[in-house]
Amino acid sequence: MKEKKYNSFYYRSLVFGRNFFFILSSCLFIFLFSSCSGKKPEDFREEGRSLSKSLIKELSVIRSKEELLSRSGQVEKLFNLLSETMVKARECEENTQSKLSPFEKDDQVICDELRTELLRLYRIPGIKKIIEKLQHDALGKLDQYERLRSKRKNALPH
């Protein structure tokens, strides 16, 4: 019997990896120590915390595929805002040669809550595919930025 692509171990690993990347990126973003455009490092951190908490709150009330579909616009908007803020923070980090700030306990709690909510939702049939679609643009923005950043680094004389 031929195994369906979406049931394969490889596919599940790939899906988990993409979602884990978004969670990890979100968590790392919260800890960026950067300053740019008159913003203080704490401004980016607080903006990331606020967006992450809003996303957690939005996800926590979803109990079915239908509820996710009805809230998809807001969830997608939060994913996009978070990724845009991450890119801005990374640009500032790069421009100011800043380092990551120390990891704080509150940030770990937020990351754990986001991961818990996403894992809870993934157990509901059909939701994982919808979440991936909602994250698609946000992950694309992060990926595009990292590719450009990598090209700039490689173009610099050593």
Image (cartoon, rainbow, N blue to C red):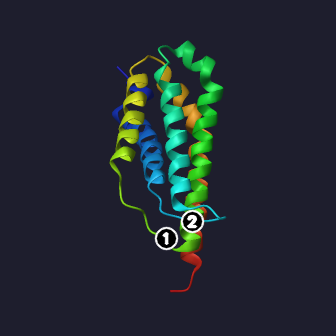
Question: Could you tell me which secondary element the residue under label 1 belongs to?
Answer: loop
Q: Nearer the viewer, mark 1 or mark 2?
A: 2
Residue pushed farthest bottom? Answer: 158
Q: Which residue is drawn at 50% across and 27% down?
A: 57
Number of marks = 2
Q: Which residue is drawn at 60% across and 51% down?
A: 85
Report which residue position mark 2 lands on: 35
Q: Which residue is drawn at 47% across and 51% down?
A: 30
Residue 108 visible in the current orientation: yes
Give the vertical position of 43 relative to 109 (above or below): below
Q: Where is residue 5 in the image (x, y as percent from the top left)?
A: 44, 29
Q: Position of residue 154 (x, y in %)?
A: 54, 75
- The answer to whether marks 1 and 2 mark residues whose Cβ atoms lie closer than 8 Å is yes
Q: Where is residue 1 in the image (x, y as percent from the top left)?
A: 34, 19
Query: Label 2 is placed on what type of residue?
Result: Ser
Give the vertical position of 92 relative to 71 (above or below): below
**Which numbered disc flags the more N-terminal residue, 1 or 2?**
2
Q: Nearer the viewer, residue 54 or 10?
A: 54
Q: Which residue is drawn at 49% across and 44% down?
A: 49
Distance (Cα) linking label 1 and label 2:
8 Å
Query: Which mark is drawn over residue 65?
Result: none
Q: Where is residue 142 in the image (x, y as percent from the top left)?
A: 57, 52
Label 2 crowd (10 A; few <14 / some 14-19 / many >=20): many
Label 1 crowd (10 A; few <14 / some 14-19 / many >=20): some
Answer with left or right where residue 144 lies relative to residue 126.
right
The answer to which quarter of the image holds residue 31 is bottom left
Q: Which of 74 and 35 is in front in this view?
A: 35
Query: Label 1 is placed on what type of residue?
Result: Ser
Q: Nearer the viewer, residue 120 or 85?
A: 85
Report which residue position mark 1 lands on: 98
Residue 11 visible in the current orientation: no
